[in-house]
Image (spheres, rainbow, N blue to C red):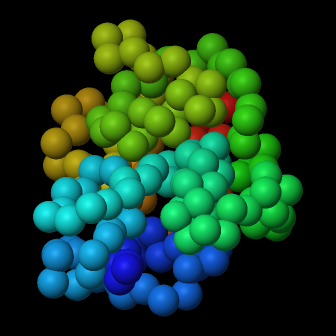
Amino acid sequence: MKIVTTPMCEEIVKLAGISDYAVNKHPTSEDGDFAILLSESKVDMDSLPIKLNTPSQVFESIKKVSEIAKNQLSDEDILAFFEGYELSKKYLNSDFKRDIDVKVYSEFLKDIVLDMGFNVDSDNFDYVVYPDYLKNKVEESENLVEIPSHGDISKNPFERIEVRYAILENLI
């Protein structure tokens, strides 16, 4: 089976123990037999959609991909990948609750703010959180929090979490 993945998912594929794969930003059936890609992506072949917005999503994605690789990593093996990533470890399996209401402009950011314990409220909010690619669509003008999206951030999911969560931790 020929596996193809996207640049944003490549690190997960490597960590899960798959070494024979191709990388393509927009995989097609001409590139391979099976794709591992972000859940928002659509392809014309069998695929495993994964989410990489929160530490628990990264954990679960590594686990799922390792099963496909028939490399079945243990929870301890996967937790070792979190070493050196303070915020990723802090929010893995966390249950934080914060009394801060935010309006969110994208689904991937909604995953993150809920994981960090913020309340999502589109009517009464303290902050507006939006991805950089929607900057021109934001209607509000105060208490704006811009979060880097796929184009302006590391392909490493742990590094993405560290950057995005650090920005939002400044609201606390």
The number of discs equals: 0
Q: Quadrant of residue 162?
A: bottom right
Q: Quadrant of residue 71?
A: bottom right
Residue drawn at 57 percent across, 24 percent down: 118
Residue drawn at 72 percent across, 42 percent down: 92
- Note whether residue 77 is visible: yes
Quadrant holding the N terminus: bottom left
Closer to the camera in the image, 77 or 7 = 77
Closer to the camera in the image, 146 or 1 = 1
* 60 left or right, relative to 88: left
| Residue 35 picture location, percent across and down | 32, 69
* 17 left or right, relative to 96: left
* 106 left or right, relative to 27: right
| Residue 58 picture location, percent across and down | 59, 54
- Note whether residue 170 is visible: no
Quadrant holding the C terminus: top right
Closer to the camera in the image, 99 or 115 = 115
From the viewer's perspective, is residue 21 above or below residue 34? below
| Residue 121 picture location, percent across and down | 39, 15
Closer to the camera in the image, 100 or 73 = 73
| Residue 4 picture location, percent across and down | 34, 78
Residue drawn at 81 percent across, 63 percent down: 77
From the viewer's perspective, is residue 149 above or below residue 111? below
Residue drawn at 27 percent across, 75 percent down: 33
